[in-house]
Image (spheres, rainbow, N blue to C red):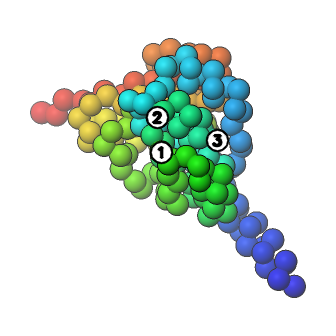
Amino acid sequence: MIWIYIVGSIVVFFTFVVFFGAPYVPSHRRDIRRVFEHLKIGPKDLIVDVGSGDGIVLRIAAERGATAVGYELQPVLVWISRLASLRFPKVSIVLANFWRIELPPKTTLVYAFSVSRDQKKLAKKMQTEANRLNRSVKLLCYGSPLKEVTPDSTFEAYALYSFHPLLSS
């Protein structure tokens, strides 16, 4: 009987995430390694992963010396990611809604497995954060490129964007 409650809880949590975030789709290690090598991600970087899932992006960033913070809505994935990341002191996973947090002050790159329904919201969030931090912040999208923003560059299935603070009058 307890298994029914456990399975039911997991189904409810994953369904909740689908409505408020993107479904869990694991990123490919090989692809992340190549793009992080291409971008020269290293110790000077603080990487934020939107919907960090199992934390693979965070761990690969940490392997390159970067600090990495993941935001995940799904409690089971937070638990799995934290366990998998125990030997990486520069990785932290937060149970939080990315749309409701402020980026850490030293964020250099935000990684997002882009979902087309959230493109405008993601671009707006990034611009808000660049304005708040009063400096440029980069966004690396995998999958769906942003339609209303021109990328700085592309690499395989990735698009890199820069959001610069807007001058206020």
Say whether disc 2 or disc 3 marks the residue closer to the N-terminus: 3
Disc 1 marks which amino acid? Lys
Mark 1, residue position: 90
C-alpha separation, residue under disc 1 versus residue under disc 3: 13 Å
Left or right: where 76 falls relative to 118: right
Question: Is residue 118 visible to the viewer in this orientation of the structure?
Answer: no
The answer to which of 16 and 44 lies nearer the viewer is 44
Residue count near mark 1 (Cα–Cα under 10 Å), binned few <14, some 14–19, many ≥20 = some
Say if residue 2 shows up in the picture.
Answer: yes
Name the spot of residue 133 as percent of width and height, x first.
26, 39
Instruction: Sort mark 3 into few (<14), some (14-19) or many (20+) by Cα contacts within 10 Å.
Output: many
Q: Is residue 157 above or below residue 70?
A: above
Q: Which residue is mark 2?
A: 66
Residue 95, above or below 46:
below
Label 2, label 1: how many angstroms apart (C-alpha)?
7 Å
Q: What is the secondary structure assignment of the residue under circle 2?
A: loop
Residue at 70%, 61% (x, y): give it: 15
- Name the residue furthest bottom: 1
Q: Marks 2/3: CA distance?
A: 13 Å
